[in-house]
Amino acid sequence: MSLELDRTFSIAPMLDWTDRHYRYFARLMSSKALLYTEMVTTGAILHGRGDYLAYNREEHPLALQLGGSNPEDLAKCAALAAQRGYDEVNLNVGCPSDRVQNGRFGACLMAESALVAECVDAMKQVVDIPVTVKTRIGIDEQDSYEFLTDFIDTVQAKGCSAFTIHARKAWLQGLSPKENREIPPLDYARVYRLKQDYPGLNISLNGGITSLEQAKTHLTHLDGVMVGREAYQNPYMLAEVDSRLCGLTAPALSREEVIDKMLPYIEAHLATGGRLNHITRHIIGLFQGLPGSRGWRRYLSENAHRPGADTRVVLQALQTMQAGI
Ligand SMILES: Cc1cc2nc3c(=O)[nH]c(=O)nc-3n(C[C@H](O)[C@H](O)[C@H](O)COP(=O)(O)O)c2cc1C
């Protein structure tokens, strides 16, 4: 099943950032990018009050990223995800935050490959959609290539055939999650080597990719690339994903057309009691690098949170930018 999804380019799961509003917005710019939800814990899904699995149908192809390490709970959540139409379930084995470690999941699970394999197995037993793993190249002092391949061997033996590898290790103590995305050095060569040694696995590279040019280079070694922060902070990079990486020829929407398509979405959100800034916070980077983009940003940040703010604020921000104010 896993081969049915095109994993050439994916947008990384990012807590608080890749919510369904961002994903709807991202999908307007790329029809091919595989989108990931933020990490959702099994506890939230099984015992929380809200509907943590809600999404817009336009978001497909869409993967649910789960945080957890109890095989039974993960299986229940994977089954719910499949029922709700998700295209993939992904297990988070890369997050180093203290909270996540206290729950015994995320990156610390790299040291418990047998448990990860059991989790994958439990999920695979109950769903037909792909079950994948996002991990790092190591944790703490356990950062040898052999440590990584031991982990991959154990997990693939239970049927995981697609891995996304954040090409840096995590320090479980002493660094914040943010520092753990910046300080441990990137080692792309290690991920390339992994693909060479496991040609039958689908391997995507994550970490530090800031342009489609770089993505293209990585794709000469690997099956896929996953982009996080750049896809969020400079989202219009997504407009060239279909044509430059995925061989599609349909022209991308212009930035203004993207806004145009967001307006009815925003209106529908406001009509159900949502606030404008729930959505505008994700589109603030759309004009990144263009003259006037500061005006756009500033207008939105100063006005979108005000009570009663609606799509007129977005149109006004556009005008402010175009007028170079
Ligand atoms: C705000 C933020 C939240 C993140 N949340 C998650 C998460 O929920 N699950 C996960 O696997 N990784 C999470 N990450 C890590 C990213 O998925 C990705 O691995 C990391 O940012 C490196 O990729 P990049 O250099 O392209 O940003 C998060 C990163 C950021 C910046």
Image (cartoon, rainbow, N blue to C red):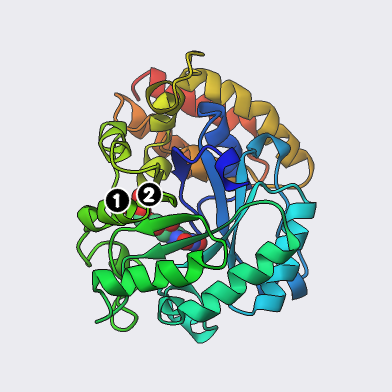
Comparing 219 with 33, the one in front is: 219
Q: Is residue 281 above or below residue 70?
A: above
Does residue 199 appear to the left or right of 251 in the view shown?
A: left
Q: Residue at x 63, y 46 (%)?
A: 1
**Looking at the picture, how far across and down is residue 92, in whole percent?**
51, 66
Q: Residue at x 44, y 21 (%)?
A: 247
Q: From the image, tell me which residue sits under label 2.
A: 199
Does residue 241 appear to the left or right of 187 in the view shown?
A: right
Q: Is residue 241 above or below residue 303?
A: above
Q: Which class describes the residues within 10 Å of circle 2: few (<14), some (14-19), or many (20+)?
A: few
Is label 2 in a helix, a strand or a loop? Answer: loop
**Looking at the picture, how far across and down is residue 184, in whole percent?**
22, 67
Name the mark on residue 196: 1
The quadrant of the image that shows the C terminus is: top left
Comparing 323 with 142, the one in front is: 142
Q: Disc 2 vs disc 1: Cβ atoms closer than 8 Å?
A: yes
* Label 2, label 1: how far apart the Cα atoms are: 6 Å
Is label 1 in a helix, a strand or a loop? Answer: helix
Residue 304 can be seen in this image: no
- For the image, the number of numbered tags is 2
Say which amino acid is labelled 2.
Pro
Q: Residue at x 60, y 73 (%)?
A: 119
Ligand 1 appears in which quadrant?
A: bottom left
**Looking at the picture, how far across and down is residue 227, in whole percent?**
39, 45
Q: Is residue 169 above or below residue 166?
A: below
Residue 266 can be seen in this image: yes
Name the mark on residue 120: none
Q: Which class describes the residues within 10 Å of circle 1: few (<14), some (14-19), or many (20+)?
A: some
Q: Is residue 163 above or below residue 28?
A: below
Say which amino acid is labelled 1.
Gln
| Cβ at disc 1 under 8 Å from ligand 1 | no
